[in-house]
Amino acid sequence: MSTFEALTGDNAVAMAMRQINPDVVAAYPITPQTETVEFFAEYVADGLVDTEFVCVESEHSAMSACVGAASAGARVMTATAANGLALMWEIVYIAASNRCPIVMCLVNRALSAPINIHCDHSDVMGMRDAGWIILFSESGQEAYDNMIQAVRIAEHPDVLLPVAVCQDGFITSHGMERVEVFEDADVKAFVGEYKPQWPLLDIENPKTFGPLDFYDYYYEHKRQQVLAMENATRVILDVAAEFNKQFNRSYGLFEAYKLDDAEAAVVVANSTAGTAKVVVDQLRGEGLKVGLLKPRVFRPFPAREMAEALSGVKAVAVMDRSISFGAMDNAGPLYLEIVAALTRHGVQVPVSDYVFGLGGRDIVPREIEGVYRDALKAAETGQVENVVTYLSVRE
Amino acid sequence: MTELTEIRWHGRGGQGVVTAGKLLAETAMGSGQYFQAFPDFGPERMGAPIRAFTRLSSKPITIHSQIQEPDVVLVLDPTLLGVVAVAEGLKENGTLLVNTSQSPAEVRTATSFGTGKVCTVDASHIAIEEMGRDITNTPMLGAFASATGIFDIDDLAEKLRAWFGKKISPEMVEANVRAMRRAAEEVQEG
């Protein structure tokens, strides 16, 4: 029997970590760190887990310790946010290239400067080419569910890639909601025991990790990372299918909300997707055919599947909580991916971008309703009025 | 309970505003309701005006915006009247509940909240008498339950005991429960 608990998103993730009981957790309390590490440190102190908790001197060291422990053959987790992730940078790439199946709780917050600790997606968007699998979560519940699935995805022999589980800083990380917590035994059974294929500590079979790898084999190793990413889509779906069956959920690569007969669709990730659902319901009540596509898997990007899901709509509006400065139209990363996916797969509809919520600026249903009304107009005319709109910004 | 009740809390840093919001949310969960409880994400300093939000619903809540048009506003600190626009956005038929020694009529004048229900309770006085400290979050919960009828006082008492159980002394737990019950009885409507 699962129980319902009143948990913040940070606490929900820590709860998943307690149930998973990883071998090693390394983290550093940079500002802004999440409460996840604090909660987890309590579990360690209370003897509820037998995790080796490594307090390091920086985020760079935290990710380094994670890479070392994962190479040794341990099941490893960490948590970070914003500038903490930025300080991990060098090792974020090494974790993926060394094929370390690390699971990271990433609470999405704005990068400085100016100094800001609130929600946006500029932190995770910077790591989109680093070779990590990236999952988004609308709520604390989804972050909890994704953490459990992430372990299986990361450790799958056909994948062996690190996974970042994202949720919105403050909005869900510090917001308390009703969270269904599964039985410890069920979570433990689902994640299973980790049997590393090539542990460094298997001294009978010596191996080398992270050596010099020049023009002789470096390229082949990069090619293998691509294969792992390709395999990941299938593994993510397989793990989701098993999870859905056991825990009564409906996870896939993304969530399509009232999209089947929709004429206008919004694409938006994390907590704002929940707010958008309220707007969809309201507009459907007025007889307007609108729907929502909420990305769950951002890396590997399910371009074909998303294009298929959006193939029936007449206009798409993407909402981006970050900016890809200097990119085409100075648009957001999600817009760029969606435009590429639709073009690549022959879906020719007007697509517009709405940058919103940078540095934690609140986004309310009325604003999302405006996005839908714009999209409905674009569906009618076949034209995009503004390629990129900055919602609620002072000009 | 109506489908969705949105509540905004006003207080000062250190008065237990966030705790009260969470306690209310947990009580809702205990009776099978869905809820959200979240602070206003500003810098939290002792004594500075702060806000917190609670949503209660019989259905799952997916909205993740701040609350702009609350059904209920609770003011934990009487010195905020005239400093913070506590009635801002409050629905016309909403409820304003203030910890103050003033009458509901006086609060109505001070806040220019014309149409809805105004309730007052001297929660500070009750808190000092029962607990020896001006911590008004638990009495205000009692007043909330009584003013809105959303919660049963006995359920709330049980939740308080469970919540505070290990954190404070048994005497203080019971003092909190007494303060909560007294505030529920002494709340005035006008």
Image (tube, grey):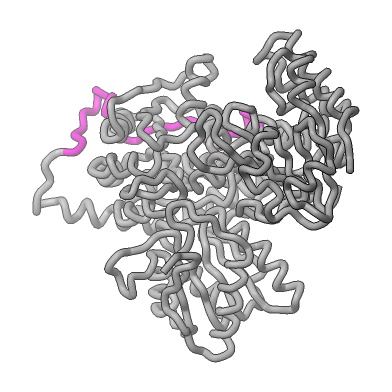
Taking depth in this image into account, of A281 and B70 the one nearest to the observer is: B70
Residue A233 is one of the magenta-drawn residues: no
Q: Is residue A371 visible?
A: yes
* Along the viewing direction, whichever of A64 and A169 lies nearer the viewer: A169
Looking at the image, residue A115 lies above or below residue A39:
below
Q: Quadrant of residue B176?
A: top right
Q: Main secondary structure of the magenta part?
A: loop
Residue at 62% across, 59% down? A275
Q: Position of residue A229 (x, y in %)?
A: 36, 55
Question: What x and y, as percent, mark residue B159?
Answer: 78, 25
- The quadrant holding residue A255 is bottom right
Q: Which residues are magenta?
A: A183-210
Figure quadrant of the C terminus of chain B? top right
Query: Which residue appears at 40% of the width and 34% of the height?
Result: A78
Q: Position of residue B177 (x, y in %)?
A: 81, 19
| Residue B127 image position (x, y, % from top left) | 75, 20
Q: Is residue B139 above or below residue B86?
A: above
